[in-house]
Image (cartoon, rainbow, N blue to C red):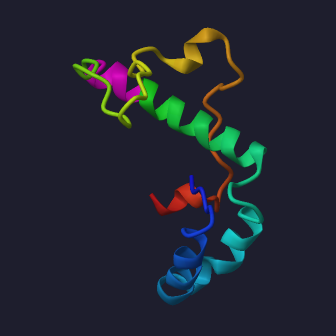
Amino acid sequence: MLHLRPGVREVFWPWLERTHPELVERYRGLYTRSSAAKEYRTRIEAFVTARRRAAWARHGRPPPPAAWRGRPGDERPPVTADPGATGGVHDGVAPAAGEQLSLL
């Protein structure tokens, strides 16, 4: 997912137009603001959650990092639990055909 805040937006759009002109119309539809629409973000998160669960089932869960590696003063703990396991709305639904993830 992108977050096209001021400063990033001015660099990103010219780069996209130059390197991937076939995606410009699609991305302009998705990113009318700094972020894509909530429905799209939710579908992407569900897709990633499902793929992470599948990878953990095949290869085991990676050990948590020794310490938080975020910004100085930001002391949030690392993610060690599966957010989808708490009864959330994420059910592993993959994005529709032709969505941004087709690039991955």
Q: Residue furthest front?
A: 73
Magenta part of the protein: which range?
54-62
Dividing the image into 4 quarters, which one contains the C terminus? bottom left
From this viewpoint, which residue is outermost toward the top?
A: 86
Asked if 12 appears above or below 104 in the picture, the reply is below
Describe residue 37's horizontal placement relative to residue 19 as left or right. Answer: right
> Of helix, strand and loop, which mostly describes the magenta segment?
helix
Q: Residue at x 60, y 30 (%)?
A: 92
Give the vertical position of 29 relative to 102 (above or below): below
Residue 36 vertical placement versus 84 (above, below): below
Q: Nearer the viewer, residue 21 or 76?
A: 76
Relative to 63, 47 lies left or right? right
Residue 56 falls within the magenta-colored stretch: yes
The percent position of residue 42, horizontal first and vertical second, equals 69, 38
Q: Is residue 27 magenta?
A: no
Determine the residue positioned at 38% across, 22% down.
78
Q: How many marks?
A: 0
Figure quadrant of residue 66:
top left
Q: Left or right: 95 with respect to 39?
A: left
Residue at 57% over, 38% down? 47
